[in-house]
Amino acid sequence: MNKKTILLAEDDESVRLVTTKSLQDEGYKVESVETLKTLWMLIEEGKGNILISDVMMPDGELFDILPQITELRPELPVIVISAKNNLETAISATQKGAYEYLPKPFDLEELNQLIRKALLRRDSNKESNLIGVRNNQLIIGRSSVMQDLYKSVARLSQNDLTVMIYGESGTGKELVAKALHEYSSRSSYPFIALNMAAIPKELIESELFGHEKGSFTGAYQKSEGKFKHAERGTLFLDEIGDMPIDAQTRLLRVLQEGEFSTVGGNEKIKTDIRIIAATNKDLNGLINQGSFREDLYYRLNVVPINIPPLRERKEDIPELINHFFIEALRSGLSEKKIHPDGYGILKDYDWPGNVRELENFILRISALYPEDMIDSESIRKEINKLNNNALESKKSNLYFSDIINNYFSDNINKLLEENEGEVHNYIVSIIERALISQTLNTNGGNQLKAAESLGLNRNTLRKKIIDLNIDLQSNKKNK
Ligand SMILES: Nc1ncnc2c1ncn2[C@@H]1O[C@H](COP(=O)(O)OP(=O)(O)OP(=O)(O)O)[C@@H](O)[C@H]1O
Ligand SMILES: [Mg+2]
């Protein structure tokens, strides 16, 4: 067999020795390199079939010469390995033309697979799109799931594909959308976000596409929409699952035709924007219910990105904590630390609200506790509060829907039979009767107070008491 030669540029000798040996065991010839200078010499001589290199070398950074390497040897796959496992490194590696980026420590089998893939593919690709690298590290986390995410972001920032970001609330969907924009060739144009869940349904189309004066009640002036504002940039459609069906139809047409018209307008306006959408809902479920268009789903779901919940990447928690302490410091709070014993408690908690919940937690304890080092007892106390809140809200929601569900599964046939055409009214009257009785009871039968706490008009309440046949006497007596 014709042995392939691997140029292995590694800063740390012990690591290099291990890698050399294991790659040789795989049947490769390995040429160890200790400086960028020697590396460049070998590159110029045309040596090697693949390059595996560290970022930091004793005499400089690989990224300084990587563009020259890929220019001179476009067929040479470059695998960048680095201990600085952040989005920045992944982006730099991709932008400077590396074939793959592998965070340390890595699995030799993983490296081996990459080498095989790279050698297979090396003739078919080479496109490198140089974009200025930014210094602000936006996204924190070195867990392997986050590394995968960085790789996707790095690749996706080099093209214009529509991206759909999935993730629970607070996992960082908007942050990732911004990073995709920041690192793309659109970054000097606007990033515009629109949250479908936050604007009244009837205004969504006008918010997106703008409207003409007088096109609907309240449209006193012509107004531009987000499509116009985001021109040449990125439009982030947040909570896309909440988009009303009419707006979905219109959006689909715009995506198909590449042009839009304002609400009430006829003129077709060409559009050049990248769409990123996000949701924490199960879109397939919405499609089955008929509240999300399947064809729009396929248009948007070109590249799905999944952001894992924080409980599946707990190793990121300490670094996130430090990051948020620095954020607290920036917002004027004093410098704080958590006692080392406290970290375990924070890692044991499941963070249902994900990174946002952790962020709020750190900001809150920074503001609440005067001491510089917050002890584990205080951390436990604060976490218990979170646990109690979560339990309470879960209990009340679950409990209530459980009762109703059980009631239905036991009685549905009888209900449908006996209340033909009146099922809805019948069920609502049962619930309403219980609610009003209970509220009267709590207020000692005082109708005025009960009406106030229910948010009902006093006369409405009185009418309901009569219609629902509520026994006022028993409510008074119970108090
Ligand atoms: N990996 C991360 N590193 C640093 N900060 C993060 C990270 N992930 C999330 N955050 C922070 O957590 C907060 C929530 O993030 P973001 O708004 O992007 O989440 P989201 O998924 O859009 O949430 P929602 O579904 O509730 O809108 C933000 O303040 C964001 O800066
Ligand atoms: Mg969001």
Image (cartoon, grey):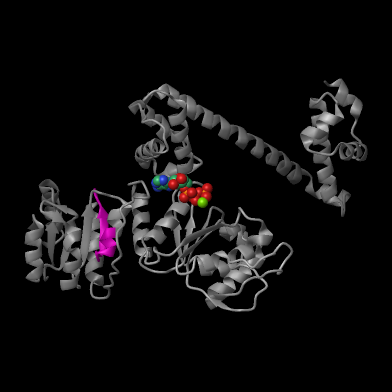
Q: Is residue 375 above or below residue 355?
A: above
- Judge left or right: residue 90 versus residue 205: left
Name the residue rendered at 52%, 70% in the picture: 299
Say whether residue 2 is left or right of residue 343: left
Up-down relation of residue 410 to residue 95 (above or below): above
Q: Residue 208 or 402: which is nearer the viewer? A: 208
Pick the front one: 216 or 235 = 216
Q: Position of residue 322 (x, y in %)?
A: 35, 37
Q: Identify which residue is drawn at 81% across, 45% down.
A: 427
Q: What count of labels does the image hold? A: 0
Please tell me whether residue 103 belongs to the stretch shown in magenta. yes
Task: Estimate the x, y position of residue 126 in percent, counting from the top left.
Answer: 26, 73
The answer to whether 434 is drawn above or below residue 413 in the figure is above
Q: Which residues are magenta?
A: 92-106
Position of 376 with respect to 476 (left or right) is left
Q: Quadrant of residue 94?
A: bottom left
- Magenta-span inclusion, residue 59: no
Q: Nearer the viewer, residue 425 or 277?
A: 277
At 88% from the left and 49% from the top, the residue drawn is: 418
Q: Quadrant of the C terminus?
A: top right
Q: Which quadrant of the rendered structure holds the N terminus?
A: bottom left
The spot of residue 237 in percent (x, y) is 53, 60
Is residue 28 in sight in this rendering?
no
| 298 vs 64, nearest the viewer | 64
Residue 188 appears at what percent x and percent y?
39, 64
Quarter assignment of residue 232? bottom left
- Residue at image coords 61%, 53%: 198
Regarding residue 14, the answer to whether it shows in the image is yes
